[in-house]
Amino acid sequence: MANDPAVDFFLRSSLTALWLVSAVEKLRRWPQFVRIVGEYRLLSVATAPWLAASALATELITALALLVPETARAGAATSAGLLLFYSALIARELASDRRQHGCGCVGRAGERALHWGLVVRNLVLAALATACLLPVAARAWTWLDTVTILAALPIAALLYAAADQLLALPSATPRRLPSPALAPSENRHG
């Protein structure tokens, strides 16, 4: 099984954009990101700045690797690995009932407390990254591929932003409706 060149380029470009935007957001909110990394309790809190810098550097190197055809598969494997690692960290925090800190991820969803939707989102993105590990079919690139990519990338960005907005909404806790009280029937006739 082989990936179509346009699909492979689309997936790699989307992942590159994700990692670059993520890195810019981490830099913009560096003190907050370092604090969040410390709240994950991977190592001592004193190591949080180093762990945060490592995550940022890994994301930037991954984005660059995805752009170069010779390193694209390594970038895809690293993307999948990072997303799975981030999913596991969030799942561990949720299982330990430590959900009050943010995820340290990009977008509005990263601004609120941890929730399972972030794990699902990261697992879906990891699955897409693994699709880039497939060999690319040998066929000529056409003008239609270019048009498709130019149309698909902004649509994918909008879909990601919409999903991010949905993930940022407060989760609704199911509530039981009160049982209707059995009121005595009213006698309207008399």
Image (cartoon, helix red, strand yellow):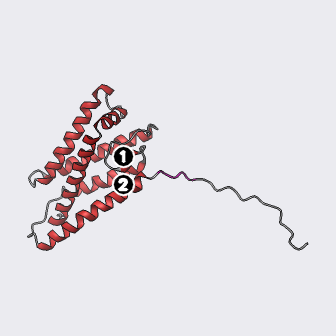
Which numbered circle lies on residue 66? Answer: none
In the rendered structure, which amino acid carries the disc numbered 2? Answer: Asp
Picture disc at residue 110: 1
- Of 168 and 176, which appears nearest the observer? 168
Tell me which label, 2 or 1, sits earlier in the chain: 1
Residue 21: x %, y % from top left: 24, 50
Residue 38 visible (yes or no)? yes
Judged from this view, the residue extending furthest toward the right is 190
Foreground residue, 99 or 165? Answer: 165
Q: Judging from the image, what secondary structure is the residue with disc 2 in?
A: helix
Segment colored magenta = 170-174
Residue 95 falls left or right of residue 43: right
**Residue 48, relative to residue 187: is it above or below?**
above
Q: Are marks 2 and 1 in contact (CB under 8 Å)?
A: no
- The image quadrant that residue 43 belongs to is top left
Judge the density around disc 1: few (<14), some (14-19), many (≥20) Cα neighbours within 10 Å. Answer: some
Name the quadrant of the N terminus: bottom left
- Residue 17 in the image: state x and y as whole percent: 22, 54
- Residue that label 2 marks: 164
- Crowding at mark 2 (Cα within 10 Å: few <14, some 14-19, many 20+): some
Visible residue check, residue 74 = no
Name the amino acid type tagged 1: Gly
Q: Whole-percent x and y of residue 46?
A: 30, 25
Main SS of residues in magenta? loop
Which image quadrant: the C terminus? bottom right
